[in-house]
Image: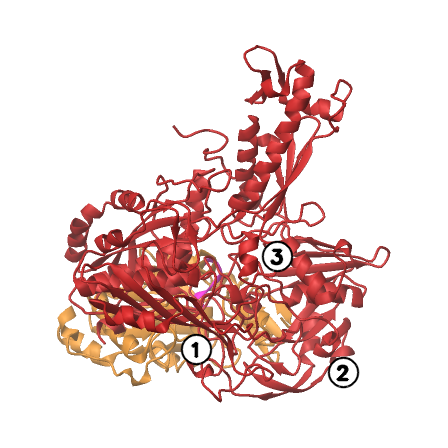
Chain colours: A red, B orange
Amino acid sequence: MPKDSGIGASSKRREDVRFLTGAGNYTDDINVRGQAYVYFLRSDIAHGRINSVDTSTAEGMPGVVRVFTGKDFEGVGGMPCGWEVTDKHGAPMQEPPHPILAQGKVRHVGDPIVAVVADSLEQARDAAEAIDLDIEELPAVIDMKSAAQEGATLVHDDLKNNICYDWQLGEADDAKVNDVFANAAHVTTLDLVNNRLVANPMEPRVAVAEYSRGTDEYTLYTTSQNPHVIRLLMCAFVLGLPEHKVRVVAPDVGGGFGTKIFHYAEEAFCTFAAKACNRPVKWTASRSEAFMSDAQGRDHVSTIELALDADNNFIGLRTNTYANLGAYLSTFSSSVPTWLHGTLMAGNYKTPVIQVNVKAMFTNTVPVDAYRGAGRPEATFQLERVIDKAARELGVDPIALRRQNFVTQFPYDTPVALTYDTGDYNGTMDKLEAAADLAGFAARRAQSEAKGKLRGLGVNCYIEACGIAPSNIVGMLGARAGLYDAATVRVNATGSISVMVGAHSHGQGHETAFPQVVADMIGIDESMVEIVHGDTSKIPFGMGTYGSRSLAVCGSAMVKATEKVIDKAKKIAAHLLEASEADIELKDGQFSVAGTDKSVAWGDVTLTAYVPHNYPLEVEPGLEETAFYDPANFTFPAGAYACEVEVDPDTGQVTIEKFTAADDFGNIVNPMIVDGQVHGGIGQGIGQALLENCAYDENGQLLSASFMDYAMPRADDVPFYGVDHSSQTPCTHNPLGVKGCGEAGAIGSPPAVVNAVLDALNSGGRAVDHIDMPMSPSRVWTAMHG
Amino acid sequence: MYNFEFEKPSTIADAVAALATEDAQALGGGQTLIPTLKQRLAAPSKLVSMGGIAEMQGVCVDDDGSVSVGGATPHVAVARDAAGSYPALAALAGQIGDPAVRNRGTIGGSVANNDPAACYPAGVLGSGATVVTNARQIAADDFFQGMFTTALDEGEIITSIRFPVPQAASYQKFLQPASRFALVGVYLARFTDGVRVAVTGASEDGVFRWSEAEQALNKEFRPDALMDLRINPANMIADLHGSKEYRAHLVSVMTKRAVEACM
């Protein structure tokens, strides 16, 4: 029976009332009295040496408050990287400076050179046009393999080469790996590109900063997934400000998808300039600026080799990847191709020998960082594509080949540093086969063929490491921050509850789902619980929302804090009921003495806590508790996806006819929200597979710099999804038994789509091994006729 | 955008007078011009809106049976009001952009702009329509002169476009995945005196007539008549979304589909 409230209920998203009626409060809705506007003059070339910047005319233009260049920031820190990766020889990664405004060189189209602050945005733009830039264009470093060559043009002149790090995970003994491949009965090899993406949240980035001379305090309103992280990075590493004098507010945020995790130059600039100009300073990115300044995603070029024995058991896996970092290290960029990618190369399979090699490259392109899934989609794509190719080469059923190699015993230590605590990959695959009606595929294919279309079925599995934490492990791996989270449960006198959380909701539905948990634990109505998030002056120090971590990590902190509240409330109830604390039970918002009909209501206890007239003297008044939670392990959501496509043989056009997801997210708090998260993730995965392509030409010009050329998925590009999350193996180490669901769809769906298209083509008699994403009609047609 | 003067005249004569100012520019629905202004890629001294001129609005059927569309008529009105009189043209209008674009964008604006991937130029050229301006009447075959280039003089306004109605017609549009302009669009119209095939989206020279296909279809109006015809890829557009060869191939496929739709 579906529940109608509490954990497991599909409570409607309360935040949608304000979002859908235009009552949201986004950063661009915030206007501060007396604010000035900043316009960033950005590089229109990919690589160049700045000979001179003449701002003298601009400074005298109407409305101009002040013009800033890189020189104004020479004594200021650059944008920091939050994760130090150690290369395979034990050396730290090469870590070039990332100035707020370009110093010496420009390194990508969109690199900010000058910032003009003026009374209006149009005046700032007018003044920017009067700036005289003398920039000597240098050859652009674009292709990663060329960039790795000895003697290649350097993106950063002070580095020894363009390789940030040459990293390895898994089996370090090359001879052992070679031996596995030499003795394999079959080896399948595949060259793959994981296409670069632009996240394109509906709301572009915005920053508004103000400074009070009276109190020496700053407030920064910004479009962020993690306000405390922004405050820490900006204060400690960039501007050298004391944190207690800085408030960072991330109000309603219109989508992040990872790209709003990072600390960006523009928000540090506005904070700096607010004091320097003694005026609040506002910046709102145009969509064009978003294309050339938001951290982009993916962009891996890989070769993967899978070795199988004579019985089709996976015996070895080796990958060699070039990962594009762009021109500078974005906040968490270094972790994505390494610890969020290499560690997932085992997938759902018990392959005993795995070696992952990653060269991370600097190029004259926009920085690349985490985008929904972050490293895990890249791992899943390689693995599930090579398995599919192996099945075709061997003439075996791709599902059977996967089942044969599944991990079935838990906990399972992979050869690439993770311990999967739980899972049931065969059970999840069973759910998929039923939900997707795979048995009926042949009949559906016949129907498509009767219309002159090729129909294909693609199936794949995925596993991801979510709930990112634990701090001690990520610390050993190079993280420069902890990854716990925090919650404060503040019970008001009349029994309503405000929960201040470190997680940030920007589409995930926390404001609905988190109260379901607290209300369920106490037995009160969900409407009595409100979530407070996104303001460092209100919430405890939590690490924000990314990596499908909010419920698993912050939700666990909230459970711990609620448990503390309940424990204290029981003491008060015991006093009121003149009973022993050990005999007090809490059910449906009533405290009762076990085995009696004596009870006191939640609201009476909370009122007593704040009006402690009849009160246990040894207990502090009030009812408010905080908990920090640092998990013992990652969580491991896993699933199996099936995609059916039709390909028009005349045009190469692919349409998705059916898409089914079977996910194991452990326990589920709100099934409707989980469905929505999966839908959104699959939509983005289909976007990557069929449509989205962030492309640069050889000079580093962004070819897909607007929605005229960058194809976002639209409603009619995606089918009605089938989503089944009834396969549930609860996480073994967090109190809710939850695993996280935010990224799964984006991780699991691209290989399903590609596998389906290749199945359609091969079944139609065309031997095509692979088509790079996005599988545009042009690419599919070319592959069919190539 | 840069500052500009704005006028919204209510007669064609006033509009012509307003456009006499140096660097003045006519504004239709603004679906191309306004984004261009926002990016500071154009700096007209004055915008003269066509939106207030009643005689440039709407769809009507003339005495000779031809369909006239006022130059300032938005796509949504053509999609609705030409559905009975010229269904293929109405269908074309209904496929332009999205609802917001169709409610703002106008036929005169689109045709005057002559974007190489726009839909209307194919419909106008494929129909053998007549572009009527404040000064003269221009045959479609003379009007389109290469991408973003037309026979219009400075300050000349498209007041209406007159379409002869064919026996059968079809617009087959293959979408560019991002912009949803035509990657290739083929407008085929079959008249008693012959077939016209106009292609948009494909050529570096903008919209063009595929005369070989017309000749083949005039001999024999069936899809197979096109079987051995290939268009030369040399002048086709190549970009992120398709090679020259792919576009050339799509011209054949879309033309064949248009024939099938007219059978």
Q: Main secondary structure of the magenta part?
A: helix
Tag 1 residue? B136
- SS for dot 2: helix
User: Are dots 1 and 3 on a single chain?
Assistant: no
Q: CA distance from mark 1 to mark 3?
A: 55 Å
Is residue B13 among the parts visible in the rendering?
no
Question: First in sequence: mark 2 or mark 3?
Answer: 2
Q: Which residues are magenta?
A: B103-108
Query: Residue A174's x, y, as percent?
Result: 36, 73
Q: Which mark is residue A56?
A: 2
Contact? badges 2 and 1 (CB < 8 Å): no
- SS for dot 1: loop
Instruction: Check the image and report above or below for B16 versus A349.
Output: below
Q: Nearer the viewer, mark 2 or mark 3?
A: 3
Q: Nearer the viewer, residue B257 or A556?
A: A556
Q: Is residue B161 left or right of residue A230?
A: left
Q: Nearer the viewer, residue A79 or A275?
A: A79
